[in-house]
Image (cartoon, grey):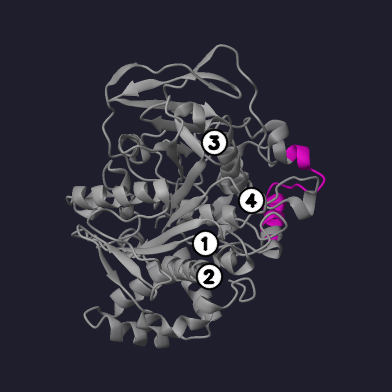
Amino acid sequence: MMKRRQFLGGCSALALAACNPTVIKPTPIVKTHSGSVQGDVVQGVHRFLGIPYAAPPFGQYRFRSPAEPANWQGVFPATQYGPICPQTGGIQLGLPDEGEDCLNLNVWTPDPGNGSLPVMVWAHGGGQVSGSGANSLYDGTHFAREGVVLVTCNRRLGAEGFLYLEELVGDGVGPGNLGIQDLGFVLQWVQKNISNFGGDPNNVTLFGESGGGAAVHALLATPGSEGLFHRIISQSGGHAAQRPDTATAIAERMLNHFGMGARDREKLQALPWQMLVKAYDLIDEQGLGRPQIYLPVINQHMPIHPVDASFEGMGHSVEYLIGHCRDEARLFSAILPSLEDSVFYRRADQILAGSGQAWSTVQSAYQKSFPNLDEDQISTRIVGDLWFRVPGLRIAAGHAKFATGKTFVYQFDWESPLIGAAHSLDLMVFGNGLPFAPLAGFADYSETSRRMRRAWVNFAADGTPSTPDFEWRDHSEEESVVHIDETFSTTTGPPPELEPLARVLSQSWLALDL
């Protein structure tokens, strides 16, 4: 049986799909606040890889907030991806090696001399335990050709990013959201430097998928993130969060596993990261995670549940584009031996408990809306919706009701032959291939990819994803949802199958303990 952590990481730390382009010539030298860099011009796009944006998060910096990297002399050769952060599972084929100097980023730009181009910063998926901005599916060439400065990055994952030590150790160690702080530090780097790469620091869109989509919204719910970005795109974010009591219990189990106590901070900082990775399964199997052990923690650093952010007055000036895939969980059911023995089903049970409804009640509502689906297919649809669709719709509802910024909602309907419109297939927006291509049947995705990317670029440019041949309607207009396929369409009104879930769509997730 596949380990739970292995699949959770693998579902968005995706297989390679793009061929290596031919390097044409070196870029001009570009200055950053830490030193000068020089990359490659590849197929007309200026590409800078592996630029350090923070100090290596080990030694004295381990389990602490990100710190500025050391300045360098001369010109940094930004011609290859840097090391990736330690992974707890996931698909690492074709990625650089894991390493301690892993907080680096990558930039694609059509014109470093412009200074006024929209900027898009990508947060990779991987369930907060795996993934990297170096995945070739995230290559920013196509976005750059359409007039965007595209940034991808690494952030701390697993125990390095989310082990909550603060209540045990104190002294600012292990605040439980270091992976989210890293993402904020990337955006601070963008504010300081991106104009030298052709980007406008006053027009930044933060976007991500799966664990990256959840990280986007966790950052929005973090005090101090205001002004670092102006728009967000959240693709299939799960938006789960850990409570301090649960997170502290996980940390205690981890310390006990290594025979350490609260006073052993230096010993813990010196522990090889590989040992924390190996301990994941042992700790996870004890069932402490809600629904998994490494998630952003609700505490002083992120005082509200990310799903409640708009209802609590956060992100009101930010423009939103948020959505999900129609058949999210079909990917998981295709790979896992049993969907019912997975973190996804665990989360579904948790949300159903918060709704006050039984499985049978929700299944009945879904069966009325989707009479052509059998019982197993209905259950799979419900699991996917509870993990991704339901929190996204609550986020959208709050933003549409309270915010001054616009709110756009989509459902990804492009259907592969074998797994339908499954989780991660919306990554075709980059134009570099399909994740899990054999499972997706190697289907032609080019037209949907092109149209989707054009909508994303337009949204980043001026806050509206409309294109000359399709007008997007704000979600505040009759709960409008745009359906993404080779052609786009719009539906309106509350989905009837979600009526039994009214409580989790309308009430505080912090109060409901979700």
Looking at the image, tell me whether mark 3 or mark 1 is earlier in sequence order.
3
The quarter of the picture where residue 409 lies is: bottom left
User: Which residue does the numbered mark 2 point to in the structure image?
Assistant: 398
Sequence-wise, which precedes: disc 1 or disc 4? Answer: 4
Instruction: Please give the label number shown on residue 190.
Output: 3
Quick one: 42 or 162, which is closer to the camera? 42
Rendered view: 251 above or below 476 = above
Q: Amino acid at mark 4?
A: Asn
CA separation, marks 2 and 4?
24 Å
> Judging from the image, what secondary structure is the residue with disc 2 in?
helix
Left or right, 88 with respect to 161, comes to left
Mark 4 and mark 3 in contact? Answer it, CB < 8 Å.
no
2 or 4: tag closer to the N-terminus: 4
In the rendering, at what x and y percent does residue 171 appear?
80, 45
Q: Which of the two labelled residues, at mark 1 and mark 2, occupies the earlier sequence position? A: 1
Residue under the image location 52 percent in, 52 percent down: 216
- Please name the residue that numbered disc 1 is placed on: 239
Residue 260 falls inside the magenta stretch: yes
Magenta: main secondary structure: helix
- Closest to the observer: 246 or 340? 246
Label 4, on which residue?
A: 177
Q: Is residue 426 above or below residue 497?
A: above
- Residue 166 vertical position relative to residue 65 in the rendered view, above or below: below
Between disc 3 and disc 1, the foreground one is 3
Q: Amino acid at mark 1?
A: His
The residue closer to the viewer here, 328 or 93, is: 328
Pick the quarter of the image with the N terminus. bottom left
Span shown in magenta: 249-267
Distance between the Cα atoms at labels 3 and 2?
Answer: 28 Å
Q: Is residue 52 visible?
A: yes
Q: Are marks 1 and 4 in contact (CB under 8 Å)?
A: no
Which residue shows up at 69% across the image and 31% down it? 59
